[in-house]
Image (cartoon, rainbow, N blue to C red):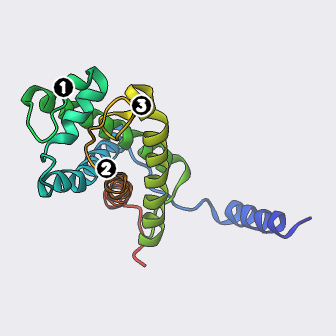
């Protein structure tokens, strides 16, 4: 018998003898509130660096991110580089909110089932891991579905883009960290260490 099997058996016998580890049991509406709040906070965290980059750069406008979401779904005619198309911005904000809600729901389900975020270092580590997974899924799986990711990135179809790739990396890192920290703060199952 290996050492890990022995440790597992001892831990299992100890749990059986002394009872299960106390874990906060939350109602479904509370879990939904935590997941949606974490997702929306993460979505805002992702948008902030991208919007600041657009605002600070002369070649871009601050609200290109929501226009890019609309243009990615409905065609590049809805994207204006260094300008404002108000209906694409409104629709794009709605699309980004839906993305953030779905993102929060998936993170909440994964965290509720597999993670026990009790300490700040665990939460930050989970945030970085979630940022990497979210980046890989969005950038290499979702974006190429339509127009090879234009206007989020420069492609053969379009030479316009919202921001360089490193800005999106910063945005997705903020997305993961803010989502994880918000989940941890609202969940209430933490030990201060």
Q: Is residue 192 above or below residue 106?
A: below
Pointer 2: what residue? 38
Q: Residues within 10 Å of mark 3 (few under 14, many from 20)?
A: some
Nearest to the observer: residue 111 or residue 128: 128
Quick check: 96 above or below 181?
above
Q: Rounded to the nearest whole Å, what is the CA distance between mark 2 and mark 3?
A: 29 Å
Residue name at image x 17 percent, y 51 percent: 54
Q: Is residue 32 left or right of residue 83?
A: right
Q: Is residue 181 left or right of residue 81?
A: right
User: Which residue position is annotated with label 1?
Assistant: 78
Q: Quadrant of residue 161?
A: top left
**Front-lying residue, 109 or 16:** 109
- Residue under pointer 3: 148
In this picture, is 121 found above or below 126? below
What is the CA distance from the residue labelled 2 to the residue labelled 1? 29 Å
- Real-space Cα separation, disc 3 to disc 1, in angstroms: 16 Å
From the top left corner, tell me how far across and down residue 8 is, in percent. 76, 63
Q: Residue at x 25, y 25 (%)?
A: 76
> What mark, if any, has residue 157 been given in the picture?
none
Q: Mark 3 or mark 1, which has the lower sequence index? A: 1
Residue 161 drawn above or below residue 1: above
């Amino acid at each position: 018998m290996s050492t890990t099997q022995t440790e597992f058996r001892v831990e299992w016998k100890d749990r059986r003898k002394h009872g299960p580890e106390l874990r906060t049991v939350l109602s479904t509406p509370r879990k939904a509130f935590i997941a949606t709040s974490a997702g929306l906070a993460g979505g805002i965290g992702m948008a902030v660096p991208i919007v600041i980059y657009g605002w600070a750069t002369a070649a871009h406008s601050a609200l290109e991110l929501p226009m890019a979401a609309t243009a990615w779904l409905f065609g590049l005619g809805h994207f204006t580089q260094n300008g404002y198309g108000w209906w694409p911005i409104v629709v794009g904000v709605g699309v980004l909110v839906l993305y953030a809600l779905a993102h929060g729901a998936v993170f909440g389900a994964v965290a509720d089932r597999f993670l026990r975020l009790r300490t700040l270092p665990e939460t930050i580590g989970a945030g970085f891991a979630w940022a990497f997974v979210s980046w890989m899924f969005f950038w290499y799986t979702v974006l190429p579905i339509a127009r090879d990711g234009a206007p989020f990135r420069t492609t053969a179809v379009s030479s316009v883009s919202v921001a360089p790739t490193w800005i999106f990396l910063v945005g997705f890192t903020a997305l993961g960290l803010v989502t994880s920290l918000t989940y941890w703060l609202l969940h209430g199952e933490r030990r201060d260490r």
